[in-house]
Structure formats: C-alpha cells, structure tokens
Amino acid sequence: RVNRQPLRVGAVIDNAIHRLPQHAAFANTEFDIQLSSDLPLIYADKLRMEQVLVNLFTNAIQYNDNKKPFLRIMAEADEAMVHILIEDNGIGIAENHLDHIFDRFYRVDVSASRQTGGTGLGLAICKGIMEAHGGRIQVRSTPGAGSTFIISIPAFSAKEGEDDEKA
Ligand code: ATP
Ligand code: MG
C-alpha cells in the first residue's frame, strides 16, 4: 500500500534530481523548473513519487540523440489535482507506440532504445504508482522533437485525515 503524507512538489523534484545516476549525460543535463506560485501540497508516498520522477527523468535524458539534454519541469494545479509536466528534447515517440509504452517490457525498437539496454518496466511502474495514488500518467510526443509526460496527483486538503479513517 502507499504510505501517503503531504509533500512539497519542489522538494520531491529536487530529491529525484539528486537520486539520478552521475554519468556524463546526466551531469550535462539542464533543468528548468517552473512551479506555479499557489501550488498546493500533494498527498503522496514520498519514495514512490520520487521513483516515478527518477524513471521519467532517466528516460528523458537517455532517449536523446546526442543533444545536450534539456528538461523543462512544470507544475500547476486545478481544484483537486496537481499536474507535473516533464518535457524533454529527446528523440520523441512515434504515434503507433504511444498506446503501448506503459505496458510491461514494451520498448520502442530504435537504436537509441537498444543501446541503453533497459527492461521496459520503468513506465509500467510509473503507471502503477500513479494509479495507486488515484492519479494518472499521460504522454504526448513529436518524433524528432521531444516528449512530454504529465503526471497528475491528488492535492492535499485538510479533509484528508477524515477520508482515510472512513476508507
Ligand atoms: P527500464 O525498465 O530500464 O526503464 P525502458 O527505459 O526501456 O527500460 P520504459 O521506461 O518503460 O522502459 O520505457 C519504454 C520505452 O518507451 C523505452 O524503451 C523507449 O523506447 C520509450 N521512451 C520512454 N520514455 C521516452 C522518452 N522520454 N523519449 C523517447 N522515448 C521514450
Ligand atoms: Mg526507462
């Protein structure tokens, strides 16, 4: 089960960045973080939410054809949810693959994927964690230009404690 607590989105993002491996490509990555000013706390499992971001940041840096990796991370909220957008300048994902990349063991068969030798589990794990939080993960992409992954997480509200006891 998920062990939820109120968390600051900025802290979760910073922790995930610090947990990335320190290879050259990662050290060379530029991050642009834009959090909307009135962002609520999220109600989430700290380690699992960091794991989602580590997986997404790792993909965003890995699936890149020799450009300097640039990640724009934005967070905004609506009434109930906080949305974190992770935009990269990588190789992108062709439309026919977009419906499948969240499936376990699915990898796009391009040289950039084969070289990195992943297992195809990262995004399936992200999807499972987001769904366990009552949230979701979405993607849009332009091949050759980059991809944007969007995760949506319930915002923390003062009622949260009561809800847990009723559940
Ligand atoms: P691992 O289990 O090590 O994460 P993986 O990276 O191959 O292996 P996923 O993270 O699930 O597995 O990603 C599935 C596939 O989706 C990748 O193999 C890659 O082809 C594609 N992909 C994922 N993220 C991106 C991205 N940001 N840009 C381009 N392609 C991506
Ligand atoms: Mg991966």
Image (cartoon, rainbow, N blue to C red):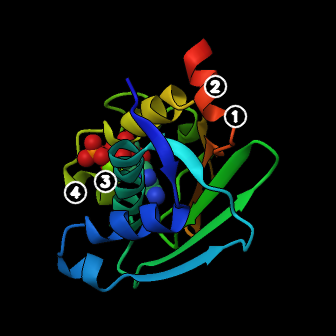
Is 13 located above or below residue 160 in the figure? below
Task: Give the Cα separation between the discs numbered 2 and 4.
Answer: 46 Å
Residue type at mark 1: give it: Lys
Does residue 75 show up? Answer: yes
Q: Which residue is mark 4?
A: 116
Badge 2 vs badge 4, beta-carbon distance below 8 Å: no
Q: Residue at x 41, y 79 (%)?
A: 69
Which x, y percent locates residue 23?
A: 17, 75
Q: Is residue 114 left or right of residue 98?
A: left
Please tell me whether mark 2 or mark 4 is closer to you in this view. 2
Q: Callout 1: 10 Å neighbours few (<14), some, many (20+)?
A: few
Q: Which residue is mark 2?
A: 162
Task: Give the Cα separation between the discs numbered 3 and 2.
Answer: 46 Å
Q: Which residue is mark 1?
A: 159
Which x, y percent locates residue 5?
A: 47, 43
Residue type at mark 3: give it: Ser
Residue lying furthest top: 167
Badge 1 vs badge 4, beta-carbon distance below 8 Å: no
Q: Is residue 7 left or right of residue 24?
A: right
Check mark 4 vs ligand 1: CB closer than 8 Å? yes or no. Answer: yes
Task: Give the Cα separation between the discs numbered 1 and 2.
Answer: 6 Å
Which x, y percent locates residue 35?
A: 64, 72
Check mark 1 vs ligand 1: CB closer than 8 Å? yes or no. Answer: no
Q: Residue at x 34, y 42 (%)?
A: 122
Check mark 3 vs ligand 1: CB closer than 8 Å? yes or no. Answer: yes
Task: Give the Cα separation between the discs numbered 3 and 1.
Answer: 44 Å
Residue type at mark 4: give it: Thr
Badge 4 vs badge 3, beta-carbon distance below 8 Å: yes
